[in-house]
Amino acid sequence: MTALQELFLKELEAVTSTTALRELRSRYTGKNGVITGELKKLPTLAPHERAAFGKQVNTDKVFIEERFKEYEQVLISKEIKSKLSKDPVDITLPGYYKKPGGRHPVTIVLAEIADIFVSMGFSIEEGPEVESDYYNFSALNIPQNHPARDMQDTFYIETGGQSGEGAFVLRTHTSPVQIRVMEKRVNESRTNGTPLPPLRFIAPGKVYRCDSDISHCPMFHQVEGLVVDKNISFANLKGLLEGFLRKVFGPSVPVRLRPSFFPFTEPSAEVDMGCYFCKGGGCRVCKGTGWIEIMGAGMVDPRVFKNVGYDTGQYSGFAFGMGIERIASLKYGIDDIRLYYEGDLRFLRQF
Ligand code: PHE
């Protein structure tokens, strides 16, 4: 063993912490350490002595590094042991737990609705939430002075002072998707001969109305439906919607159609189902009538077909639209629509 190695070992014996150990190491093998100091002596030596001296310094360096590594392991495990004995870990404590996220009730109900329609051969379409006045109103036969266009109901988008036909709105319903899909079909049929009908799809999505109280929210969700083919009748509409509502609310739920009006359907109907809560006896939810209004529907108005270039002599169809929050509220007995969008985990965790 060289004198340098002996000196190092002696100093090493006195070291009791990893901090002190690292300090010792850098004193020996660091940039300005003992080893570097030894190497600096090389030029002062006679040429024939240099090789042997350099080799020796290198051996010393390797020796020091090895002892350092060994001793470091010893010290580390000693330090862990002493830390554990002073500050023991209670391994019986429960671990940290993050509650998993879940699906929002609106998402759950939408998925259920989509499943039912997909199983009946419907496809799923989507349209933009910022919609032109044309698609949201005009193409659906909603005239310029119709109350639905009122600023009190519709969110208009600032587009540099445009109004009327050139204006943009947050769509107030999903019905514009009817127009978009029928137009798309017309274009496809022109370019590659795809037949226009049959058309059978639902279009779920967000809609916006300037309204806010216990049963209205400025943003909510609708599912639109459209069926177009040869020989589509009102009876088909009734049968489909009855079948749908019985899948959602149970096989014995009564369904009735009431005459109503929508500019884009003729004839139009309001679809009611027997009150889910009082089973028809009359309660607060159904305002004593025993019936709950669940969606709007009707035969596609010939004017709508004309606006997209469909031959009304050949084709007929029906459309329907329903609010998803409303269906979810009936299913789960939720009496305030605002609960859906307040993000209160005590509410959301129940689904
Ligand atoms: N778009 C109508 C609404 O939002 C619902 C509807 C859709 C009615 C399709 C008839 C046919 O109230």
Image: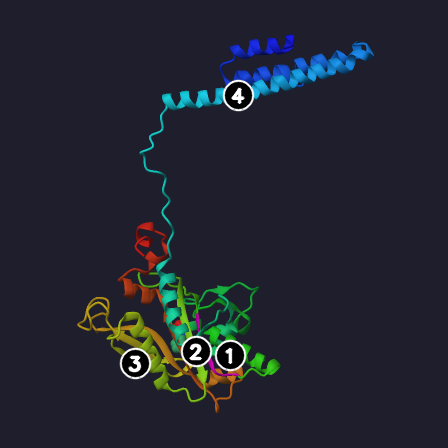
Q: Quadrant of the C terminus?
A: bottom left
First in sequence: mark 2 vs mark 4: 4
SS category of the residue bearing label 3: strand
First in sequence: mark 3 vs mark 2: 2
Please say whether residue 65 is one of the residues in the magenta stretch. no
Spot occupied by residue 185 in the image (x, y as percentages of width and height): 54, 79
Spot occupied by residue 201 in the image (x, y as percentages of width and height): 45, 75
What segment carries the magenta color? 196-203
State yes or no: discs 3 and 2 in contact (Cβ < 8 Å). Answer: no
At label 1, which amino acid type do we have? Answer: Met
The quadrant where ligand 1 appears is bottom left
* In this view, 265 is above or below 48: below
- Which label sits on residue 258? 3
- Which residue is painted at 55% across and 77% down in the image? 184
Task: Determine the image quadrant of residue 119.
Answer: bottom left
Location of mark 4 (residue)? 72
Q: Which of 152 and 141 is in front in this view?
A: 141
SS category of the residue bearing label 1: helix
- Which label sits on residue 226? 2
Location of mark 1 (residue)? 182
Whether residue 147 appears in this view of the structure is no
Mark 4 or mark 3, which is nearer to you?
4
Mark 3 or mark 1, which is nearer to you?
1
Mark 1 CB lies closer than 8 A to ligand 1: no
State yes or no: discs 1 and 2 in contact (Cβ < 8 Å). Answer: yes
Q: Nearer the viewer, residue 278 or 211?
A: 278
Q: Quadrant of the N terminus?
A: top right
First in sequence: mark 3 vs mark 1: 1
Q: Distance between the residues labelled 3 and 1?
A: 27 Å
SS category of the residue bearing label 4: helix
At label 4, which amino acid type do we have? Answer: Glu
